[in-house]
Structure formats: structure tokens, C-alpha cells
Amino acid sequence: MKITVKYFSWIRVKLNKHEDLFEVNDKLNFQDFKSYLIQKDNFYLEVFNDDSIKFFINFKEIENEEIKLHDGDELGILPPVTGG
């Protein structure tokens, strides 16, 4: 299945891209996908260890890491936004 990961704020700047497409096994939950991403790139460890960052699947905030992922899902990684 294919999962799109969309990056926002400083993460987008640091990675110099706004999204990635990952092909993964069909039976993953969010917790499994986090482990997969960390194995792909240690940068994700920093992201997932930052308690201020919010994660969304298809525009709904993830409240339970056991949520199942489906083909075509979009994971949004949204750090806090500042400005004035």
C-alpha cells in the first residue's frame, strides 16, 4: 500500500521537500509505520520524540497509535507554528 507523508514548517525546510510517498506492507498501524520511518532515516527519531509535533491521518489528529493505515492515506506531520 502507498502512504503519503506531508511535511510542514521547519520539517519541510530541513528536508527541502513537502512530501514523500512510501510503499509499505498492507497491515500496518501508525506505531508500525513510525518504526518503519525511523529505520529508513534517523531524522524521524527526532520528529517522533518531539512532543510538540502533531500527527494527522487524512486531516484527523492521531489519538491512538494503533490506528490502522490504508492504501492512499496521508500522514501529516505538523510542528507548532509561530508567527506574528
Image: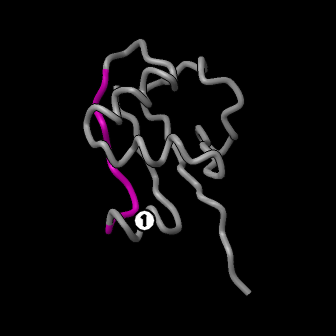
Confirm whether the magenta stretch covers residue 43: no
Question: Quick one: SS at disc 1?
Answer: helix
The relative height of residue 27 versus residue 38 in the rendered view (above or below) is above
Residue 46 in percent (x, y) is at: 44, 47
| The one of 3 and 43 positioned closer to us in this rendering | 43
In-front residue for pair 31/52: 52
Residue 2 as seen in the image, left or right of residue 84:
left
Q: Quadrant of residue 36?
A: top left
Residue at 31 percent of width and 25 percent of height: 24
Q: Quadrant of residue 64?
A: top right
Q: Badge 1, how many Cα within 10 Å: few under 14, some, many 20+?
A: some
Instruction: Name the residue that disc number 1 marks.
Output: 12
**Which residue is at the front of the view, 46 or 23?**
46
Q: Which residues are magenta?
A: 16-24
Q: Horizontal placement of 59 versus 39: left or right? A: right
Relative to residue 16, is residue 45 depicted above or below?
above
Specify the farthest residue to the bottom.
84
What residue is shown at x 55% (from left), y 19% (from top)?
68
Residue located at (60% from left, 43% from top): 55
Q: Quadrant of the N terminus?
A: top left
The kind of residue on which mark 1 rests is: Arg
On the picture, is 28 further left or further right than 1? right
Taking depth in this image into account, of 5 and 39 the one nearest to the observer is: 39
Residue 45 image point, x, y percent: 41, 41
